Amino acid sequence: MNREEVLAAFDRELRREAVADDPGAEVEHDGDVVRQVGPEDGWNGVLWSGLRSGEDADAAIAAQVKHFGALGRPFEWKVYGHDRPADLGSRLLAAGFTPEPVESLMVAQAVGIPDAPVPDGIRLIPVTGQDGVELVADVHEAAFGAARVHIRERLHAQLAAGTVVAVVAMAGDVPVSAARMDLHPGTRFASLWGGGTVPEWRRRGVYRALVAYRAREAVARGFEYLQVDATDQSHPILLRLGFAELTTTTPYVHP
C-alpha cells in the first residue's frame, strides 16, 4: 500500500468530495471549506479545508463560527496532521475551540486483514432491526457512557439507508461488545467505528474478532480500504492486524 497515494485518495473521497454520512444532513462547499450541516443531534462540522495562509485560516474560521452559530449548532473542525497552515490548531484554539484527544488515522486493505477466531463463550450477531439496535445502545452506554438516544436514532437511520454494517458480541444473553462500519458509496473506503467492549471482556480477542468480521463484510461489498480514527487503546491492535498509520487527526470542538 502506497501511503501517500492512499492518503491523497482519503482526502479526496472522504473529505474534499464527501457526501453526507447522516440522513438529514447536507455537505456544503464554502470557498476552501467543506462542511457537513446536520440536525441538532447529528454531527456538524468541517470535513476539509484547502487553506493556504494564516490570514485565509482566520477568515475561514470566523466564517464557520458565524455560520454554525446562526444555526445554534455546536460543531467540530477535524484537523489532520498534514492540513495547512501548520498552525491551524493554534488558530482554532484562539477562536474558542477546545481540542479533544489526538487520534491516529489508520488504513488497511480490507482483503489483507487476517481472520480472527471468535473467543470461547462469544457469538457474533448482525444488527438488522430494533432488537439489535437496543443491544448496541446497551454496550455503548456500558463501554463509553454514550447517550442511548443518539446511538439509537443514528443507527436506525443508517440501517434504513443501507449505509452501515453493525454487529454485537454476545456472551450468552448479555451484549458485551458492539461495533459498526459506515459504508461510503462511490468511494473505496469503509470506516470502522465503535468497537466498544465492556471492561470484564477486554483483552480477550473480542475487538480483533469484530475487526475481522467487518473486514469480510467490506470485501463482500466491494470496498478496498478500511479506515479507523484509532485511540491509544486500539492503535497497537490495529498495527498487528496490518493497519498503517497515515497521519493524526484532532477534533476541535466549538460550543
Image: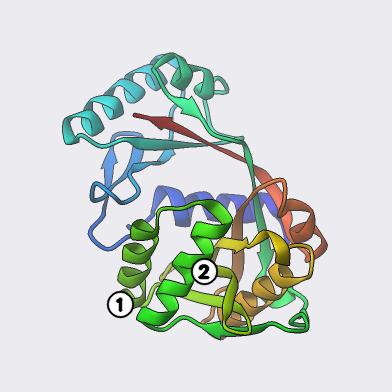
Task: Determine whether 215 is above or below 99 in the image.
Answer: below
Left or right: residue 73 compared with residue 151: left
Q: Residue furthest left?
A: 70
Q: How is the image coloured?
A: rainbow
Circles 1 and 2: CB atoms closer than 8 Å: no
Residue 6: x and y, percent?
A: 62, 56
Task: Determine whether 86 is above or below 245 in the image.
Answer: above
- On residue 160, which mark appears? 1
Left or right: residue 149 compared with residue 94: left
Residue 182 in sight: no
The disc labelled 2 sits on which kind of residue? Answer: Met
Residue 151 in sight: yes
Of residues 240 and 244, the one drawn nearer to the viewer in this rendering? 240
Residue at x-position 49% and y-position 75%: 166
The disc labelled 1 sits on which kind of residue? Answer: Ala
Residue at x-position 30% and y-position 69%: 157
Name the quarter where the C terminus is drawn.
top left
Residue at x-position 40% and y-position 53%: 147
Of residues 212 and 194, the one drawn nearer to the viewer in this rendering? 194
Residue 186: x and y, percent?
A: 41, 69
Task: Determine whether 28 is above or below 62 in the image.
Answer: below
- On residue 64, which mark appears? none
For disc 2, the neighbor class at 10 Å (few under 14, some 14 to 19, many from 20) is many
Residue 251: x and y, percent?
A: 50, 37
Question: How many badges with numbers are in the image?
Answer: 2
Residue carrying label 2: 181
Task: Determine whether 133 is above or below 220 in the image.
Answer: above
Q: Secondary structure at mark 1?
A: helix
Left or right: residue 164 compared with residue 233: left
Name the quarter where the N terminus is drawn.
bottom right
Q: Secondary structure at mark 2?
A: strand
Residue 65: x and y, percent?
A: 29, 26
